[in-house]
Amino acid sequence: MMWGMSIVTAEQLELVRQWASEGVDLNGIQKRLASDCGVHLTYMDVRFLLLDHNIEIATAAPVAQAAKPEPAASEPVVEKSPAAEEMPAGGQMGKPVVTLDELTLPGTLISGKVQFSSGTKGAWQIDQLGRFAWSELSGQPTPEELQAFQFELTQILRRG
């Protein structure tokens, strides 16, 4: 049985598809399901719902970037590392370096570390209820850095 089959109706799933095609993010879809449909899901439940039904959130890419492919050197560095390993320097062009811990911390579903281009670094984790938390955060990342981190983490989770 696919995740979400008994959670949402076919009509509600169609609304989710529409919202995703409009570029509404996971948090927005979660809020709309609650306010418009009375369906209360965790952030991870919504994420699994989209994954199970092959629903992708539309992103508006600038025309100039869509026309030319990015060189491989600007790709984010993603590596699996032990939890205690030191983080490498921040990624190029504002992209964070995101790593996954080989040994998941107790009480977490997944955990890892991140180094932002500004030098801020920290550890992150997602627990079994889908709740996200920071630990060992040195400094405060900018909203743009947090958005880039969310994007990179989403890409890592999609790849499995």
Image: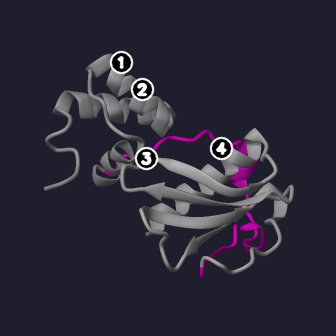
The residues tagged by marks 1 and 3 sit, at their Cα atoms, a distance apart of: 21 Å
Q: What residue type is labelled 1?
A: Ser
Residue 73 among those drawn in magenta: yes
Q: Which mark is residue 56?
A: 3
The residue carrying mark 1 is 35
The residues tagged by marks 1 and 4 sit, at their Cα atoms, a distance apart of: 29 Å
Q: Residue 44: x and y, percent?
A: 39, 48
| Residue at the image position 75 percent from the left and 74 percent from the top | 87
Q: What residue type is labelled 3?
A: Glu
Q: Quadrant of residue 43?
A: top left
The residue carrying mark 4 is 61
Of pointers 3 and 2, the one earlier in the residue sequence: 2
| Residue at the image position 73 percent from the left and 63 percent from the top | 70
The residues tagged by marks 3 and 2 sit, at their Cα atoms, a distance apart of: 17 Å
Q: Relative to 81, does residue 121 appear above or below in the rendering?
A: above
Residue 23 among those drawn in magenta: no
Q: Residue 105 carries which label?
A: none
Mark 1 crowd level (few <14, some 14–19, many ≥20, 10 Å Cα): few
Q: Is mark 4 on a helix, strand or loop?
A: loop
Of pointers 1 and 3, the one earlier in the residue sequence: 1
Range covered by the magenta-colored residues:
54-82
C-beta proximity under 8 Å, tags 1 and 2:
yes
Q: Which residue lies furthest to the front in this view?
A: 106
Q: Is residue 124 left or right of residue 110?
A: right
C-beta proximity under 8 Å, tags 3 and 2:
no
Disc 3 or disc 2, which is closer to the eye? Answer: 2
Given residues 22 and 36, the one toward you in this image is 36
State how many labels appear: 4
